Image (cartoon, rainbow, N blue to C red):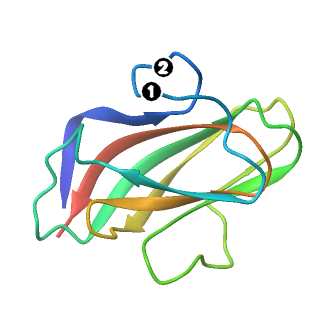
Amino acid sequence: MTVLDKAVRVWDSRPGSPQGGNGKHGTGETFFLTFDAVAEIPDDARGAMLNVTVLDADGPGFLVAFGGGGRPDTSNVNYDRDEIVSNLATVRLDQTGVYLYTSTACNVIADLQGWST
């Protein structure tokens, strides 16, 4: 397991963020979060440790972080309208990143903490 000395912000959906966010992720949206541009994860890495934060939600919902093979029935972050909620998630890598699913529209921030081989 490799833990970074300093977390790397890999995604921030808020408009104007350095990661190129263009606003909230939609209700029922699945998107792929790649780490290629911001971190050099070795080819033999199998999992990523991410701190995922949800903010500016339109209502109650949940976020799921997952690798390939389909979205699991469990959540990593549960949120409500106008809450800021974060959680550390250990997620299987799917090539160069992970998938994130938002059940209700919200902004998402993801910070890479490290990876496992």
For label 2, the residue is 17
Residue farthest to the top, as pictured:
16
| Residue 41 x/y as whole percent | 16, 54
Q: Which amino acid type corresponds to the residue marked 1 in the rendered image?
A: Gly
- Measuring 43% from the left and 77% from the top, which residue is drawn there? 68
Examine the rendered structure and indicate whether residue 49 appears above or below residue 81: below
Q: Is 42 situated left or right of 52 in this image?
A: left
Label 1: element kind: loop
Q: In this view, does 53 lie above or below 47?
A: above
Mark 2 crowdedness (10 Å alpha carbons): few <14, some 14-19, many ≥20:
few
Mark 2 vs 1: CB contact within 8 A: yes
Amino acid beneath label 2:
Ser
Q: Name the residue under label 1.
A: 20
Viewport quadrant of the C terminus: bottom left
Along the viewing direction, whichever of 36 and 90 lies nearer the viewer: 36
Please state if 92 lies on the left or on the right of 85 as rendered. Answer: left
Q: Residue at x 81, y 53 (%)?
A: 61
Residue 47 percent location from the top left of the image: 30, 67
Classify residue 54 as left or right of residue 90.
Answer: right
In the image, farthest residue toward the bottom: 69
